[in-house]
C-alpha cells in the first residue's frame, strides 16, 4: 500500500471523513491501532472486502520526513488538520473521486510524496493518477 497526506485548513476529523464515505455509499469500519495510539477508519471502496483505504488522524510530529526542509514546507501550510491514508495504487481514480467530495466540503491539499513539494488541490485532482505512485 502507498500513503498520502491530506492537509486541511479547517478542523476535520475521521468522523467527518466517515460521514462523507457513508453519504457516498461506501462501507466503513473503525479499528484500533497497535502501533500508534490511534483509531483507524477503513473505507471499503470495491466489491471485494479486501479493497479499502485506511485513514489515520495525525499531527506534524508523527509524520515522517526525509529532511527538515520537507517538514518546514508542511509546517508552512499552517494546517490544523492532517490526515494520512493508505491506498492501493490501482485505486487512485477512486481516491480522486472520493476526495472530490471531501475537498468540495473542506478544501485542502493532497500530498502523495510526503514533502509538500507537489500539492494536489481540488482543481488538480485529475492529475492525481499520474502524480502519485
Image (cartoon, rainbow, N blue to C red):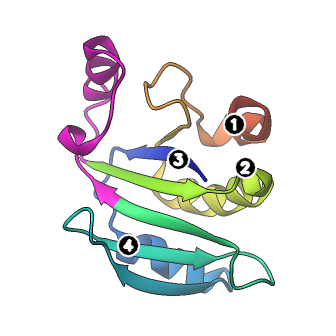
- Residue 6 located within the stretch drawn in magenta: no
Instruction: Check disc 1 and report its element: helix, strand or loop.
Output: loop
The disc at residue 40 is 4
Of mark 1 and mark 4, the one earlier in the sequence is 4
**Does residue 15 appear to the left or right of 118 in the view shown?**
left
Give coordinates of residue 12: x percent, y percent: 34, 61
**At 65% across and 56% down in the image, what residue appears?**
100
Q: Quadrant of the C terminus?
A: top right
Of mark 4 and mark 3, the one earlier in the sequence is 3
Q: Are marks 2 and 3 in contact (CB under 8 Å)?
A: no
Instruction: Check disc 4 and report its element: helix, strand or loop.
Output: strand
Of mark 3 and mark 1, the one earlier in the sequence is 3
Q: Are marks 1 and 4 in contact (CB under 8 Å)?
A: no
The disc at residue 89 is 2
Q: Bounds of the magenta span?
A: 57-80
**At 62% across and 63% down in the image, what residue appears?**
101
The disc at residue 53 is none
Instruction: Check disc 2 and report its element: helix, strand or loop.
Output: helix
- Please tell me how crowded label 3 is: few (under 14), some (14-19), or many (20+) other residues with Cα within 10 Å: some
Residue tagged 3: 3
Between the residue at mark 1 and the residue at mark 4, the CA separation in whole angstroms equals 22 Å
- Please tell me how crowded label 1 is: few (under 14), some (14-19), or many (20+) other residues with Cα within 10 Å: some
Q: Is residue 132 above or below residue 49?
A: above
Residue tagged 1: 133
Query: In this orientation, which residue lies closer to the viewer: 111 or 2?
Result: 2
Of mark 2 and mark 3, the one earlier in the sequence is 3
Amino acid at each position: 500500500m502507498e500513503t498520502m497526506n491530506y492537509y486541511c485548513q479547517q478542523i476535520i476529523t475521521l468522523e467527518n471523513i466517515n460521514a462523507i464515505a457513508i453519504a457516498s455509499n461506501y462501507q466503513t469500519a473503525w479499528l484500533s491501532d497497535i502501533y500508534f495510539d490511534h483509531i483507524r477508519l477503513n473505507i471499503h471502496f470495491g466489491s471485494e472486502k479486501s479493497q479499502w483505504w485506511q485513514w489515520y488522524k495525525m499531527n506534524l510530529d508523527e509524520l515522517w520526513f526525509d529532511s527538515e526542509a520537507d517538514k518546514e514546507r508542511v509546517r508552512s501550510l499552517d494546517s490544523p488538520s492532517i490526515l494520512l491514508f493508505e491506498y492501493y495504487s490501482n485505486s487512485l481514480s477512486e481516491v480522486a473521486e472520493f476526495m472530490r467530495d471531501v475537498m468540495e466540503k473542506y478544501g485542502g491539499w493532497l500530498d502523495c510524496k510526503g514533502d509538500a513539494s507537489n500539492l494536489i488541490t481540488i482543481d488538480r485532482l485529475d492529475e492525481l493518477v499520474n502524480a502519485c505512485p
